């Protein structure tokens, strides 16, 4: 049943598509329906109540309309003293409040649950267009019972769907599109910067996200592992569109916490793969650990920009444990391969030095797309080679004829030479240091390829 509790009014042009929130009590199949509607397995699906805790966003398209679909944690009104349940309920209520259309999901097999009435009361207060959906409606017996089963909700006959088999999802998408507000004019294209917040559990990733946004966007708890899915939030900073990706904390063995923990780890790895810049949060009190080194290695392997964030620095200042220079030295010692990455100190809790973070992010993002003019690039490399000739290997000297930069994001340099096998690791590091000393590539991994000019000419 589709209920429009308030006639949608035309809105001014905005920077986001219309939003559709999937809401309901725990374990009615919201995440499975979310995955079905967007056409890919993004949300974690597990037959355990409370798996989805934070809001998850993805774009969906139907009948030429693109809209943002939001998966939410189940509204659990039976555990008033549970901190996580309360946070999940608040997140679902915020998502419903911010949505243009609400999809209220109930369980067709289980039938009406007293909690459904309470959730319905919460959703009515939003005064938003509402679609009542009965999931798991596969059998004829269940379909026949639907009109009377949920009549007490006062929302009419629910729209039957099966997230598992896809039945009824086309009708649901039609109903959603019919209730969307008028299409807003497309804004001018703006390059978006995707920023992933990564780190071990309980280092303050969600707290940092909330501090940057100035609102309780993600659930924050002192219990490690609160964030399970990678979640996206878009905001604007200095006229730049930033997509923040909060991720679940990675443990050394992702199977320790069962399949939910395992899939959470995969989401975090996927977040690194789809970001432009990764913020590696480390605990300033503990300093860099082996897992931080592993995460930094993943970022570099994926050729992403990197900023190291020493969080909880307010506690370090209070205790007088050590100076910033000592922590930087510890980071460089534990992760020498990240020497190109800036290190910033802040407190997500108190927001002290929070203003130092985004300028670093924008600088790294700019460096990802930095392109050096070929004449200037060749002048620098030629002078460096003349000042420090390469070692002679097997009686043959390495000769670099010219250098080009065929790619950016991340920067790719190709050095055309007489024999790539003559390049030693030490000389490769020297050439990379030369590039970094002459051009600003702070926070950006550089890729340097050596190609034999003779073979290229023969082709």
Image (cartoon, grey):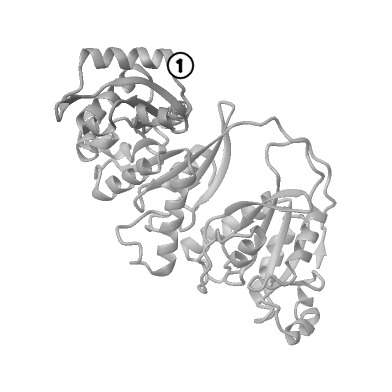
Query: 284 left or right of 9?
Result: left
Query: 200 left or right of 371?
Result: left
- Residue of label 1: 373
Query: 218 left or right of 317?
Result: right
Q: Quadrant of the C terminus?
A: top left
Q: Quadrant of the N terminus?
A: bottom right
Between 316 and 208, which is closer to the camera in this rendering?
A: 208
Q: Residues within 10 Å of mark 1 (few under 14, many from 20)?
A: few
Q: Quick check: can you spot residue 23? A: yes
Residue 164 is situated, as x and y percent measured from the top left of the image, at 63, 73
Q: Quadrant of residue 393?
A: top left
Residue 194 is situated, as x and y percent measured from the top left of the image, at 51, 39
Q: Quadrant of residue 323?
A: top left
Between 451 and 404, which is closer to the camera in this rendering?
A: 451
Say which residue appears at 47% left-offset and 30% top-offset.
408
Label 1's element?
Answer: loop
Say which residue appears at 24% left-offset and 42% top-offset.
287
């Amino acid at each position: 049943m589709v209920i429009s509790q308030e006639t949608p009014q035309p809105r001014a042009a905005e920077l986001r598509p219309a939003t559709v929130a999937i809401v309901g009590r725990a374990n009615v199949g919201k995440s499975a329906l979310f995955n079905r509607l967007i056409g890919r397995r993004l949300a974690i699906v597990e037959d355990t109540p409370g798996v989805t805790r934070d809001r998850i966003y993805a774009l969906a398209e139907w009948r030429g309309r693109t809209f943002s679909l939001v998966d939410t944690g189940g509204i659990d009104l039976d555990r008033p003293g549970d901190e996580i349940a309360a946070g999940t309920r608040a997140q679902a209520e915020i998502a419903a409040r911010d949505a243009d259309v609400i999809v209220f999901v109930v369980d067709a097999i289980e039938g009406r649950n007293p909690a459904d009435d309470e959730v319905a009361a919460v959703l009515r207060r939003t005064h938003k267009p509402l679609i009542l959906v009965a999931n798991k409606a596969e059998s004829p017996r269940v379909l026949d019972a639907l009109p009377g089963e949920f009549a007490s909700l006062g929302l009419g006959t629910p729209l039957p769907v099966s997230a598992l088999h896809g039945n009824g999802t086309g009708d649901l998408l039609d109903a959603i599109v019919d209730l969307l507000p008028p299409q807003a004019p497309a804004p001018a294209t703006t390059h978006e910067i995707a920023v992933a917040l990564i780190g071990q559990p309980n280092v303050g990733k969600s707290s940092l996200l909330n501090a940057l946004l100035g609102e309780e966007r993600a659930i924050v708890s002192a219990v490690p592992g609160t964030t399970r899915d990678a979640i996206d939030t878009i905001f604007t900073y200095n006229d730049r569109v930033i997509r923040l990706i909060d991720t679940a904390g990675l443990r050394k063995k992702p199977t320790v916490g069962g399949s939910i923990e395992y899939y959470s780890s995969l989401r975090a790895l996927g977040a690194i793969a789809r970001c432009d810049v990764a913020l590696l949060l480390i605990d300033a009190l503990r300093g860099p650990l082996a897992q931080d080194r592993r995460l930094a290695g993943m970022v570099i392997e994926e050729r992403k920009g990197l900023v190291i964030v020493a969080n909880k620095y307010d506690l370090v200042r209070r205790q007088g444990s050590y100076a910033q220079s000592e922590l930087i030295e510890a980071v460089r010692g534990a992760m020498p391969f990240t020497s190109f990455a800036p290190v910033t100190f802040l407190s997500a809790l108190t927001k002290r030095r929070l203003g130092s973070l985004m300028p670093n992010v924008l600088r790294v993002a700019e460096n990802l797309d930095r392109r050096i003019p070929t004449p200037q690039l060749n002048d620098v490399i030629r002078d460096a080679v003349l000042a420090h000739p390469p070692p002679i290997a097997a009686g043959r000297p390495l000769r670099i004829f010219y250098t080009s930069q065929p790619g950016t994001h991340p920067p790719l340099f190709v050095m055309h030479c007489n024999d790539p096998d003559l390049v030693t690791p030490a000389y490769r590091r020297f050439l990379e240091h030369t590039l970094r000393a002459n051009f600003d590539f702070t926070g950006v991994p550089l890729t340097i390829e050596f190609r034999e000019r003779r073979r290229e000419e023969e082709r």
